[in-house]
Image (spheres, rainbow, N blue to C red):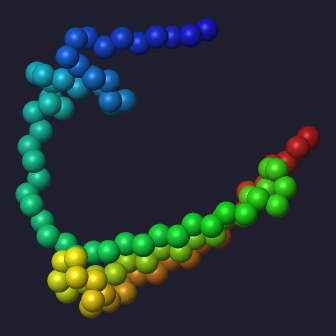
Amino acid sequence: MRRRYSSPPGRVCTGFGWNGPGTPQARRTRAAASRSNLFHVDALLSYQPVPGTVVFAGYGSDMVDEDAFQFRGLTRTDDAFFLKLSYLFRL
């Protein structure tokens, strides 16, 4: 059984309700400008030895730079490592 959804003209379904002219979601105000020199790097590796078994390993790093977009004085602030093993049990 298929269900089809159609939106009223000029409105878009965002998953949180209808968004369009005259709706509360359309009358949002912009946030104040901010300046941040945070630089974030992520790496993800995956290995699948057999179908149904996957090993994930990852690393994330947060760094701060003194001047925006110079990438010369980066100072590491946070590091994160993770390892995940996924296995499919068959009955």
- Image-quadrant location for residue 7: top left
User: Up-down: is 51 above or below 20?
Assistant: below
Residue sitting farthest toward the right? 91
- Image quadrant holding the N terminus, namely top right
Q: Is residue 58 left or right of residue 46?
A: left
Q: Is residue 80 left or right of residue 49?
A: left
Residue 16: x, y in percent? 33, 30
**Of 41 and 7, the residue lying toward us:** 41
Q: Residue at x 82, y 61 (%)?
A: 49
Q: Residue at x 10, y 33 (%)?
A: 27
Residue 14: x, y in percent? 32, 30
Q: Residue at x 63, y 67 (%)?
A: 45
Residue 19: x, y in percent? 23, 26
Total labels drawn:
0
- Image quadrant holding the C terminus, namely top right
User: Up-down: is 5 above or below 71?
Assistant: above
Q: Residue at x 9, y 61 (%)?
A: 33
Residue 69: x, y in percent? 22, 76
Q: Is residue 17 left or right of residue 88?
A: left
User: Up-down: is 51 above or below 62?
Assistant: above
- Image-quadrant location for residue 90: top right
